[in-house]
């Protein structure tokens, strides 16, 4: 029987309240990373009520979207899910380009797709590695971080920055990739399966890890749908939903035969872990297909469209380039967006990441709101945790992969 909201966060019924006590779990707890707080009501070691408390990493991200232009704001969305920053950039400019009616070039689509899947692997590596670490498995965490470093190097080669690349632009990218970048991507595709297998050997048949995750934090398919879950959390409960297949964008329509949507049926912490592990292998297939079929040509739309910043040398050497540059930078010029409002979404590593943008004709959004998957998934915690032991809190929390910057936007 699915829990109601009253069951999850209301006063417990049928329990002698004299024997209940309240425990603040976080934010100063290693498993909450100093950014999450849970107010737990315990009967002995059994959780009878769990209330998430957000607000420890509030940065005003959405309000900043109303003050920074369509290119500047990419440095802010980088910091929402800071584990997969380029995936956020792709989602933001996906919506902006829909408003402006811009169709990016084939080469740009493929490069963005490669980055989107690298970010998915990057995010899942941290989630699975940290979930094992919180349960006492240190080695798997180290193996996962070795691969994360390689993805950081790939980001640095393309953009010059490892952690917050700020790589996408309206109508294209900051700069084109070169042969060195392609070679690094190919090397990563070639070596990653071995590292993935090492983590699987450490955890998939580990008795302690299995017993700590199997049957813990179970979410049924009906609950996942009613609670608006998405991504691996929903697919682990049997919800066959993936925007890369259902609403294709970038190069996913052309590469749809290269991957499958990974789903589970258990709906528990173990199922969410296994879905993420399998998704990484599917992402490798997409990256391999994309990098081996990478189109030639420009990365930005035609300069005559006046939506992308001109080449630096054109700014220095021609009056037309200088004028074009100033018109996109000066706040009283910039883009001529239609007076419209639009919602668009992409399949980020944690699920559906959407932006709702209200355009007023200027180069800055009148309103910018986001639908972050972590905010939705953190709200499910009371439903998943009630009835479990205190020691299960870290297992459930790790399986949801909550990124606090998405909560306090």
Image: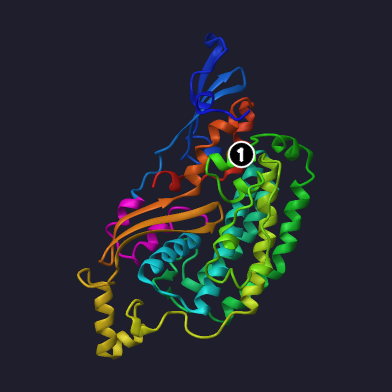
Quadrant housing residue 164: bottom left
Q: Which residue shows up at 46% across the image and 61% down it? A: 91
- Residue at horizontal 59%, vertical 56%? 242
Chief secondary structure of the magenta span? loop
Q: Residue furthest left?
A: 332
Left or right, residue 94 beside residue 60: right
User: Is residue 277 found inside the magenta-colored segment of the image?
Assistant: no
Where, quadrant-wise, is the N terminus in this rendering? top right
Q: Decide if residue 363 is in sight here.
A: yes
Q: Which residues are magenta?
A: 61-84
Q: Which residue is the site of mark 1?
A: 222
Taking the image as shown, residue 400 lies to the left or right of residue 365, namely: right
Q: Report the residue at 32% width, 80% height from top.
A: 306
Q: Nearer the viewer, residue 136 or 194?
A: 194
Q: Which image quadrant is residue 384 in? A: top right
Against 298, residue 52 (above or below) is above
Residue 104 location in percent, x, y? 45, 76
User: For the image shown, how many numbered marks are present on the structure?
Assistant: 1
One can see residue 24 in this view: no
Considering the numbered disc 1 on the image, is that residue within a helix, a strand or a loop? helix
Q: Residue at x 48, y 79 (%)?
A: 105
**Residue 243: x and y, percent?**
56, 59
Q: Is residue 126 above or below residue 260?
A: above
Seen in the image, is 203 located left or right of residue 336?
right
């Amino acid at each position: 029987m699915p829990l109601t909201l009253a069951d999850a966060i209301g006063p417990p019924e049928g329990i002698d309240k004299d024997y209940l006590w309240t425990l603040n779990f976080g934010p100063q707890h290693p498993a909450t990373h100093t950014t999450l707080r849970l107010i737990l009501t315990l009967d002995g070691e059994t959780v009878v009520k769990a209330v998430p408390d957000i607000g420890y990493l509030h940065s005003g991200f959405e309000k900043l979207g109303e003050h920074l232009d369509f290119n500047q704001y990419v440095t802010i969305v980088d910091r929402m899910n800071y584990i997969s920053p380029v995936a956020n950039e792709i989602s933001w400019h996906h919506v902006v380009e829909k408003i402006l009616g811009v169709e990016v070039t084939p080469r740009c689509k493929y490069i963005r797709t490669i980055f989107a899947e690298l970010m998915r692997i990057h995010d899942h590596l941290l989630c699975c590695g940290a979930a094992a670490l919180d349960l006492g498995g240190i080695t798997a965490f180290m193996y996962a971080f070795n691969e994360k470093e390689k993805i950081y190097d790939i980001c640095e080669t393309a953009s010059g920055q490892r952690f917050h690349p700020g790589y996408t632009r309206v109508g294209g990218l900051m700069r084109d990739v070169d042969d060195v970048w392609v070679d690094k991507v190919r090397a990563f595709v070639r070596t990653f399966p071995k590292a993935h297998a090492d983590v699987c050997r450490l955890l998939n048949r580990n008795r302690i890890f299995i017993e700590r995750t199997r049957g813990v934090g179970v979410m049924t398919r009906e609950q996942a749908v009613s609670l608006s879950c998405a991504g691996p959390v929903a697919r682990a409960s049997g919800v066959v939903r993936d925007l890369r297949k259902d609403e294709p964008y970038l190069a996913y329509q052309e590469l749809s035969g290269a991957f499958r949507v990974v789903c589970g049926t258990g709906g528990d912490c173990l199922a969410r872990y296994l879905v993420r592990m399998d998704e990484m292998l599917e992402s490798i297939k997409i990256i391999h297909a994309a990098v081996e079929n990478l189109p030639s040509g420009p990365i930005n739309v035609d300069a005559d469209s006046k939506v992308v910043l001109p080449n630096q040398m054109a700014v220095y050497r021609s009056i037309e380039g200088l004028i074009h540059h100033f018109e996109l930078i000066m706040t009283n010029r910039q883009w001529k967006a239609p007076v419209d409002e639009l919602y668009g979404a992409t399949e980020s590593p944690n699920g559906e990441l959407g932006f709702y943008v209200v355009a007023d004709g200027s180069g800055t959004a009148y309103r910018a709101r986001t639908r972050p998957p972590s905010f939705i998934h953190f709200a499910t915690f009371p439903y998943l945790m009630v009835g479990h032991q205190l020691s299960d809190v870290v297992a459930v929390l790790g399986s949801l992969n909550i990124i606090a910057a998405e909560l306090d936007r």
